Amino acid sequence: MKTTNENYKIQKKITTIIVVLFLIKLLAWYFTNSVAILTDTLEYTINVISGFIGLYSLFLSSKPKDKKHPYGHGKVEFLSATIEGTLMIVSSFVIIYEAINNLKHPHELKQLDYGIYLVALTGIINFLFGAFSIRNGKKNNSLALIATGKHMQSDTYATLGIVIGLILIHLTNYLWIDSVVAFIFAIIIIVSGYKILRSSIAGILDESDDELLEKVVQLCQSVRRENWIDLHNLRIIKYGGTLHLDCHLTIPWYLNIHEGHNEIDILEKIVKDNFGDSLELFAHTDGCLDFSCKICSKKDCEFRKFDFVKRIDWTIENMYSNNKHFLE
């Protein structure tokens, strides 16, 4: 809950900044009558809408679990990011239409100096707050914050191109540059929107995060205890800012319930110390079988049936498997 509330507060700050920047962009378009700046402003309308959608999604995500939502409300963040990515792509086609129309019917630009200053200012602020949003999104496992940050930073690159284009127009008076710049950065926005859309759909479909899995596997391997004979059937599911980790832990069969539960508590503490309180661990314990002896390094085991041969290193492939590990 602490993490989700923090995400909500961050999104409120980001949304406020987005609204202010949108007003500045409107002012820049009013001064210049530039289609490139209009393009930037139209696209930024999506930021405003997405900002409020992200804010609402994080508000829902921060709500406690209930009877109808036993895993919490974090999945709504994926829906928010899906809408944001879709709106970015749609707005890009509107931008392309405006750019083509302006090539056919060019119009005079005015007060480019004011426009350049204002648009450049929005670009700098966008980049800084976009980086802030992405950093906190990665720290708190919030796709909504990451999507907002990436959207803001994609606007920064578009804004940079628009500023360069306006400077060239100011120096050369070639009005067609305005449309070309708008067209180029519409393509960039489409690519950025597709990446956000792809990530959100992957989350909705519970697609595995190989990078996260690798970190968890390396951690478990590095802190492996003598009683942890085998770890398999590993699954990680993201629910917004909350991670749910499921696994099967093979321990010596003769440990009593309290001793077995203690091993799980130790594993849970180690994982939470490295990934934060936003992670929930659900571990199922399996008792070892005769074939486990060959991969079990536990010393002084009076029930050992076979000599220890070697310990199997844990990898994504064998920990993801639903089968207990054994030597051929």
Image (cartoon, helix red, strand yellow):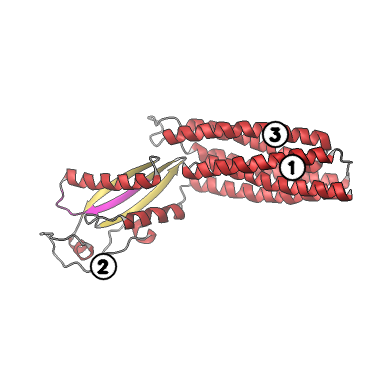
Q: Amino acid at mark 1?
A: Val
Q: Residue at x 14, y 52 (%)?
A: 254
Between discs 2 and 3, the one toward the N terminus: 3
* Mark 1 and mark 2: Cα distance apart in space: 61 Å
In front of the other: 50 or 321:
50
Task: Give residue 90's position: percent from left, percent from top.
Answer: 68, 43
Q: Is residue 307 above or below residue 109?
A: below
Q: Are marks 3 and 1 in contact (CB under 8 Å)?
A: no
**Which of label 3 and label 1 is nearer to you?**
3
Q: CA distance from mark 3 to mark 1?
A: 18 Å
The percent position of residue 214, horizontal first and vertical second, equals 41, 56
Q: Which mark is residue 94?
A: 1
**Tag 2 near tag 3, CB within 8 Å:** no
Identity of the residue furthest to the left in this view: 302
249 magenta-colored: yes
Is residue 303 rendered to the left or right of residue 249? Answer: left
Task: Look at mark 3 in the image and give the residue it sits on.
Answer: 22
Residue 309 in sight: yes
Camera-nearest label, 2 or 3:
3
Q: Position of residue 270 (x, y in %)?
A: 32, 47
The answer to the question of whether label 1 and label 2 lie on touching residues, with beta carbons closer than 8 A, is no
Residue in the picture at 22% in, 69% down = 309
**Res 257 quadrant in image:** top left
- Image coordinates of residue 61 in percent, x first then y, are 47, 34
Q: Which residues are magenta?
A: 245-255
Amino acid found under the numbered disc labelled 3:
Phe
